[in-house]
Amino acid sequence: MTTPITGHTGLLCLLGSPVEHSISPAMHNEACNALNLDYRYLAFDVCEDQMPSAVEGLKALGVRGWNITMPGKNIMCKLADELSAASEITGACNTIVNDHGKLTAYTTDGIGFMEAVKENGVNIIGENMTLLGAGGAACAILVQAALDGVRQIDVFNVRDPFFSRLEEIAQKLNERTACKVIVHDFEDPQQLKDAIANSRILVNGTSVGMAPKTEATLIPDPSFFHQNLFVFDVIYNPAKTRLLKDAEAAGCQTANGLFMLLYQGAASFELWTGQKMPVQLIKDKYFKQ
Ligand code: NAD
């Protein structure tokens, strides 16, 4: 039974624009309800230049925490008092914890990715990774994988505006972690083939292959795949991208980004409430593969 809203009920929320299609309110309200936690989670459509005043309001109201989606992930870091290691390196965050007015920023997308990989029974600690992409999702994955102990990460991106930020992040990771991060562009397909040949995991962190352009893939040549390769796509719409279909046909184990989405939410939930999200319940209800 849903706990009644009283004078004690606390608020959690999502800030960004657009937010109306987000699964976060359903997921977090279900979890609070299952654990009898006296919170409600709402989504607020807030554009980037409204973020500072929104944050002042949330602080004044004593809101326990919030998620941030685009376009607020970078500006929110500037409004926080402290940054997690991953948020400090990427300059982005998707979660704020409000401890009596002191705001700490975290990025849980990479945590969600690492958890989703584990869930597939694959261990990538001490192994090599090939990562495609340098946007928000890819950088979160890059940083968390390096912090958690992946041995080497070869990152490929086109020379678009994301590329120079990728080089800066790679430099920080090479200075601060034991992981070796090598940045490439897509110009030389042999470099990509060699990196994949030496990798336990290939991750598509780009939007290439997402609906409606579902026939697009960054790995059109199936000879790039090998039997010991786990192929992970951050995309979950469609559930099986062309990349995943081609990789499966070549004998690879594969996974889409659905459980990454679940586990980034679970990590935020635990930061706010100190309790584990009942993930099996949430999976059964909202994350049917
Ligand atoms: P973004 O706009 O920040 O980054 C886009 C990335 O795609 C960049 O690296 C860009 O260079 C690359 N790219 C775009 N078009 C390309 C092309 N034609 N050729 C080569 N590279 C190209 O986007 P984002 O927020 O990082 O999201 C990327 C994807 O990840 C989206 O499909 C999004 O839905 C998904 N995503 C999934 C999760 C999850 O939890 N599973 C979380 C965040 C994002």
Image (cartoon, rainbow, N blue to C red):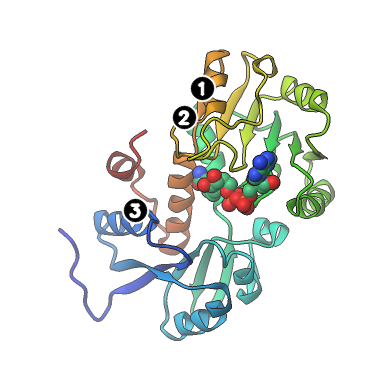
Please report the residue visible at 41 percent of the width from the left and 71 percent of the height from the top: 44
* Foreground tag (3 vs 2): 2
Residue 205, percent across and down?
A: 62, 41
Q: Which residue is mark 3?
A: 27
User: Which quarter of the rendering shows the N terminus?
Assistant: bottom left
User: Which quarter of the rendering shows the C terminus?
Assistant: top left
Q: What is the distance, in whole Å, between disc 1 and disc 2 at their CAs?
A: 6 Å
Residue at mark 2: C-beta within 8 A of ligand 1: no
Q: Is residue 230 visible?
A: yes
- Of mark 1 and mark 2, the one earlier in the sequence is 2
Q: Which mark is residue 163?
A: none
Residue at mark 3: C-beta within 8 A of ligand 1: no
Residue 260, percent across and down?
A: 49, 42
Q: Which residue is mark 1?
A: 245
* Foreground tag (1 vs 3): 1
Q: Which mark is residue 240?
A: 2
Is 185 drawn above or below residue 54 in the view shown?
above
Q: Tell me whether the residue at label 1 lies in contact with that at label 2, contact meaning CB atoms closer than 8 angstroms.
A: yes
